[in-house]
Image (spheres, helix red, strand yellow):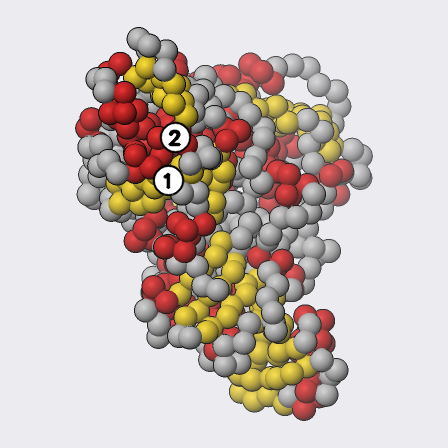
Amino acid sequence: MSTTRRDLLKLLPAGLVLAVGVGHADEPKKYGGDGMPHGLQDSPKTFVSIGEDGIVTIIAHRSEMGQGVRTNLPRVVADELEADWKRVRVAQAPGDEATYGNQDTDGSRSTRHWFDPMRRCGASARAMLEQAAAARWGVPVSEVAAINHEVVHKASGRKLGYGALALAAAQLDVPARESLKLKDPSKFRYIGKRDPHLVDAEVIVTGRSHYGIDTRLPDMVYAVIARPPVLGGKVRSVDSAAALKVPGVLKVFELAGTPPPSEFQPIGGVVVVGRDTWAAIQGRNALKIDWDDGAHGSYDSTAFRKQLEQSVTQPGGKEIRNEGDTYAALKQAARTVTADYFVPHLAHASMEAPAATARIKDGRCEVWAPSQSPQAARDRVAKRLSLAPENVTVNVTLLGGGFGRKSKADFVVEAALVSQALEGRPVKLTWTREDDLHHDYFHTICAQHLEAGLDANGKVTAWLHRSAEPSFMSIFMPDPKQLSGIELGLGLVNLPLAVPNIRIENPAAEAHSRLGWLRSVNNIQHAFATQSFIAEIAKAQGRDHRTVLLELIGPDRKIDPDKIGDVFNHGESPERYPIDTARLRKVLERVTKEAGWGRKLGPGRGLGLAVHYSFVTYVAAVIEVAVDAKGGITIPRVDMAVDCGAQVNPDRVVSQMEGACINGISQALMSEITFKDGRAQQDNYHQYLIARMNEAPKKINVHLIPPDFSLPLGGVGEPGVPPIAPALCNAIAAATGKRIRQLPIGDQLASKA
């Protein structure tokens, strides 16, 4: 049965159903409080229901993939509502932007953007319950107060539980926003308190959780797709005779794709439907397909790397930031330092590969999917099936990892199209790991060239940075060949250096594969280059890295992102979110203190440092490495310091930083996607390597800057990744004297054996 908004409300406890206005209506329209394609809205949303039994149900409209959002945002509501958390239940919203506002669970924005609206949501419900109690008792509302799931009359000591007041409260108007009395942070019961418990924890550890791949429907069949192995490729011819002879194979047919730029639409291919997934896979293996590879059939990432590296050694790239006269300052410098860096394509490689189930009945399509952007999935399915959006329901399951991959809805649309081809029969579409690695929205490849000019006293007087990298905007429009404002604002144009002459250039680079955003996006390569290069500047002078880094950060100041060419600023107002070098310095000082920067280490051991600002949060890392005689690397300890402003649940901040550290270690040590003849060469985890337990740091210490609720929230999910790779490579240089300038590190140290 399809679930509409009305059906969802029927499932909630009878009683108070609260509709509230949400969003950043007070944000300048230029920024809109949102940095992704779908904006926040200020229309009424349904988030809270209180049953006559007193059970409070709170709607979670963001997607849960381990970051704790299905717990954290409802806890914000519950805190302002003065609800007893033991009597709170959480229900997942389907994809419906008109009702719930922006549902894109990416960009490290969920808590950052919805903290204030969810506070207002809880405060509105609390005010309505207080008004209902005051009316019943015939007393002024000023004499009553909601306390721990009850409304209390202070003078008489009378009490009424939330369940007893729910129906009466439901009849009242929602209070005007300006009339709400939000809690003083000193009165918070849940917000800011460290709590490791998640609402999904029990079902996950007991194996009863529902991920995308777990969906089962009556009369369901199973499908896989043989997709064009090259960007823009298509089927020239297919022989399906052998596939149809495989036991359990039911049907084989072609699926029309969308030529580049294909955005979130499927790229097409040949569908094999079976009684089970195994039969479908075996049938696909038996297909004989002649592919037309198209324009990108000759793409070789090794050769392309050389082109990129050549382009960044030459002036003439698009000027994206220019202060002073960098070229003249470099010529006049007493000394120059130069270095080149490279980062390869990366894949998301989430533990749960994309999977979706779809069913079409009575002119309605219902899907079940681990989607980071369910409203985008709903819109794309509706468009492709020529349905009204209200006739498409996207049920959001738990995500077995996402990292940005599952905000793209192509796999959801595929499932819907296959069901349509089967006359509406329920179908589960599964991507294998090979599918996942061959047809990802890959992280872009990047070559960078940096030069610094130093005066006679060792002060950096000139900074030149060229970065060539295909743009992920190529999935939305004809390949622009230059980075968008979003990508430039991810650690490149917004580098907060106290250097009088700064020039940043962006040479053109063509996209030869399907590209997309991956956890921390372009900050990965930009932080790797800039933070490695600062360590090289210090080494060239024989000075302490920390000292040089602090000098380059310079005096405490607040930088207007607009004035340095950062038109993105993560979608935030520059007035509300300036770049604050005092906060950057503070995390640097904190992490070096906690890590014991400068302490003596034995042979083959070293400490590395990096600091980075991303997703309006400040993170610094110190990594200790040990390199053995054969070039083997172990990581005894990592220290991280983070300033994300207010912290809704410090435990989740710590967990996110720990996960980001492991993610960054994987990218630095071993992860790489290469292309030959237009095809991704890595098939599975034996080739696309991620850190195993023995390769992970032995200890990760996360040091939180004390929360300041006077500051707007920063992001948490992504900012921990960027400093890891440069800190690791800086540590290796300290331990061995060998500078790593290309990722992954792989066997680059094997020559020490």
Q: Which residue extends farthest front?
A: 137
Residue corresponding to mark 2: 164
Say what amino acid the circle numbered 2 marks: Ala
How far apart are the alpha carbons under marks 2 and 1? Answer: 9 Å
Label 2: few (<14), some (14–19) or many (≥20) C-alpha neighbours in 10 Å: many
Q: Is residue 269 left or right of residue 567?
A: right
In the image, residue 745 above or below residue 484: above
Q: Secondary structure at mark 1?
A: strand
The earlier-in-sequence mark between 2 and 1 is 1
In the image, residue 703 above or below residue 504: above
Residue 15 is labelled as 1
Say what amino acid the circle numbered 1 marks: Gly
Q: Residue at x 69, y 85 (%)?
A: 243
- Quadrant location, the C terminus: top right
Q: Which residue extends farthest top?
A: 155
On the image, the x and y values in percent for residue 689 come to 68, 51
In the image, residue 238 above or below residue 117: below
On the image, the x and y values in percent for residue 385 come to 39, 74
Q: Check if mark 2's residue and mark 1's residue have beta carbons within 8 Å.
A: no
Quarter of the figure with residue 465: top left
On the image, the x and y values in percent for residue 682 come to 65, 61
Question: Would residue 138 be visible to someone looking at this image?
Answer: yes
